[in-house]
Amino acid sequence: MRLLDVQDLHVEFAARGLDNRVRVARALNGVSFTVDAGEIVGLVGETGAGKSLTALAAMGLLRAPARIPQGGIRFEGGDILAMSDRQLEKIRGRRMAMVVQSPLTSLDPLKRVGDQLVRMQRVHGTASGAAARERAEAMLAAVRIPDPKRRMQAWPHELSGGMAQRVLIAMALINEPALVIADEPTTGLDVTVQAQVLDTLRDLVLARNLGALVITHDLGVVAHYCQRVAVMFAGRIVEDGPVAEVFARPAHPYTQALIASTPGRIARIGYTVTGGTPPDLYALPDGCLYRDRCPRATTACLAPPPRVALDDSHGAACHYAERAA
Amino acid sequence: MILDVQNLVHRFPGGVNAVNGVSFSIAAGETLGLVGESGSGKSTIGLLVTRLLAPTGGTIMFEGEDITRLSPAALRPLRARLQIVFQDPWGSLNPRMTIGRLLEEPLALHTTLDGAARIAEARRLADRVRLPVASLQRYPHELSGGQLQRVSIARAIANRPKLVVLDEPTSSLDLSVRAGILQLLDELQRETGIAMLFISHDLETVRLVSHRVIVLYLGRIAEQGPAGRLFDTPAHPYTQTLLSAHLPPDPAVKLRRHEVVGEIPSPINLPPGCFFAGRCPLVLPACTSAPPSPVILDGGHSASCLRIADGTNILDPVEERA
Amino acid sequence: MSTTTLDRVIGTARRSPTFAVGFGVIMVFAFLAAFADVIAPLPPTLSHPYDTLRPPGTGAFILGTDGNGMDVLSRVIHGARYAFGIALPAGAIMAVVGIPLGLIAGWRGGWVDEVLLRVLDVLRAFPTIILALAIVAATGQGFLNVILVVGFLDSPIFARIVRAEVLALRNATFVRAAVAAGNPEWRVLLVHILPNAILGATAQLPLRMAWAVRISATLAFIGIGVQAPAPEWGAMIRQGAEYVISGEWWVALFPGLALIALVLGLNLTGDGLSDLLDPKRRATGK
């Protein structure tokens, strides 16, 4: 059984425009991936690719006007889409937890750090009283916050960005969840702080044999902290596989373009990629969604591309991806 | 020299010492990269150099003219040649003006072109930055971030400036869009020899676009030099730390991590000696008494660290990871 | 795909029913005010000495008559003219005085800002009605005076709204970019800041006009400004108040209802406008 198993997930929004016409934005168009215990999976893509939406759907947090016309999400074998709000509340923060981008707005400004950690345990009935305080302190130590005893008494506004992000990681892990979803966990932090926060997250996830889904636009984060990666474009996963494999032999033209856009690559081979705008989610074409930007596009791309398995673990949704010999 | 800055100091009301004695110059056709983390004063320097802020101390010479104390009115004609592009493409353009009017504005302000000539020139500018002509009739909210940044660049180059300050021009943009903007800047510099001050926290981008690089820490220059030398053989412990924390987008590159303790000191109460002394693993007693002077290394490379004198300035890698 | 005007109207109404209802109410009153002579069954100040205090539904008097035997319905309809006669010029004064004040106070700060803020403090400390009463008493009665007093009294409040918008815009990147482009200060203010500041202030104008309608009616109610038998709602309510106890409720009730309806309409329009003008809500699908 997979820890998290997302299959063929579709999400759409209906919105009324200025002209009073209801139009449907197809934000996710068949997203499939899995996360197992003991692995960190990166979900990478650009603005509007649907990364955060995927995370919200996995947490069972999608609300109207979002609709899920098709697809399934299984977490520890349970069907997330079929669960009631009450059932989901029991899982969220307990079995699956989330670390979000803006740590300072995610902490309650009127509660001390220690009290928030204790409350997190009391709400889910995992511990209370002195035991909960003890665990909270141990958790702060585990996310490498210096002088955890004193930090228990700190107010959120007294924390630096990096510290606040560590506290959020502590909050997420305090109830020993099986899955952590981190949505741009270090965006906005300075480079030196980013590396430390990511080290902490990785070490804890691996030491406790959790599964983690890291959502990011930063290829550097994926390259050094994830074992597997799924590349998203226009609400689809266009390529997935082990990180080393995908970076060394990217098979989808979009993945190739992303890697060719990194400054290090440009310094070596020059400017080769002309960026483009992502397709209009309100008027998605049939077939391959990348074909307007793709240098290799042919009439074959008017048909939806299947996921071509390049080897056991690496696949790309492109008509021209070729299986390694 | 297009720009020559000597001993620039800026202190914000409230006592925040954002810039604490920075000197540099930029030649025609050159790109100078300014890197640093938050609180390094890099964006403040951009505002001072374009005189959108008045510095507390130091001098700014632009094309041989002292502009340090010029009044806003006296600065105006000069702004044709001294331009800036900001980080946020969505916020940089007046939301109630069409792209066409936005492109005509700098021409109306600094040239005697009539209406028809301005429109023609605006079209030429749009074409130059590869904006579709149809976008001239559009409003900013109808364009993508990358297109908006092209509009800002077109506005900046409208009057053939000598210097353009680029304050994180690609940081808000997606990776594949970034490359296009960087390529455009590169072309513009090759064509017209514009000098550029490229401010960014993104080490890889700075390395790609800059001829020379300055590393800032707490409003002071820690190290500077030709981009290749500085990135390949960083001399200052802070630069080494900064570079080692960078995550290159390639899993094949091994990370050599130097971890530092603590956080950046408060810019309100500056420490007396080297600003990095409190976090530096190689700190010497002398480091905390007086700020170190820059030590000249080879090839225009220099760093302000006492350890360089006896060659003990290189940090040991704390960990190596695949 | 072409978008017809009707589509836009329906679209706007769907996105902000508040605005649609409020604006609809205002339009009804505007129509009444414009064609009062045609719509009103009788002249508003025509006295019927033998038909005083007739209850609603008596003969031709659909809403009854008042103590002078004047037709209440006709008077309520004509009252809309006074309401707009106050609201529109008072609103114009607020805009003409308040916008430049707010612009300068927000952009330059300094003494203009100080004076504006202190005047606001005074206005906040004083019950406005007493202040208005004192000024009207000092400057003399009359419709024009009421308009001027109401308009000027509210100008600082409107100025503050503009000031807040300008303060937020002053540090906007596009304003900085406008300075960097070489715009002279006046051009930064008038071309770049004003059109963006006005937008937020626009939504406040109907709210301030509602206040003007209310305060002028209150003044008339306590006998200041417009005098009976002029068909002004506040004056009519004052007149009718005497009869409420003796059971002739209609004299005060109908002008009261008209007043409430118009003030509500203006307030709804203001609230709806701020929704419609909010760029975050203007975007579709987000």
Image: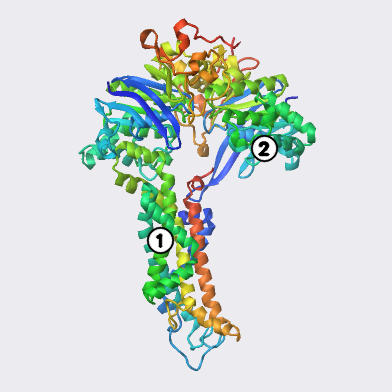
Q: Where is the C terminus of chain C found, in terms of image quarters?
A: top right
Question: What's the amino acid at mark 1?
Answer: Ser
Q: Secondary structure at mark 2?
A: loop
The image shows residue A224, relative to residue C259, as above or below, that is above
Category of crowding for the residue at label 1, using alpha-carbon neighbours closer than 10 angstroms: few (below 14), some (14–19), many (at least 20): many
Read off the chain for label 1.
C
Q: Which residue is mark 1?
A: C155
Measured from the top left, where is residue B133 in percent x and y? 33, 36
Read off the chain for label 2.
A
Measured from the top left, where is residue A38 in percent x and y? 70, 20
Residue most toward the bottom?
C50
The image shows residue B48, relative to residue C96, as above or below, that is above
Q: On the rendered structure, is B85 left or right of C48?
A: left
**Quadrant position of residue A11:** top right
Question: What's the amino acid at mark 2?
Answer: Arg
Q: Closer to the camera: disc 1 or disc 2?
A: 2
Q: Secondary structure at mark 1?
A: helix
Between residue A117 and residue C59, name the one nearer to us.
A117
Q: On the rendered structure, is C144 left or right of A315?
A: left
Question: Residue, x 65% and y 15% (percent of image)?
Answer: A312
**Quadrant position of residue A151:** top right
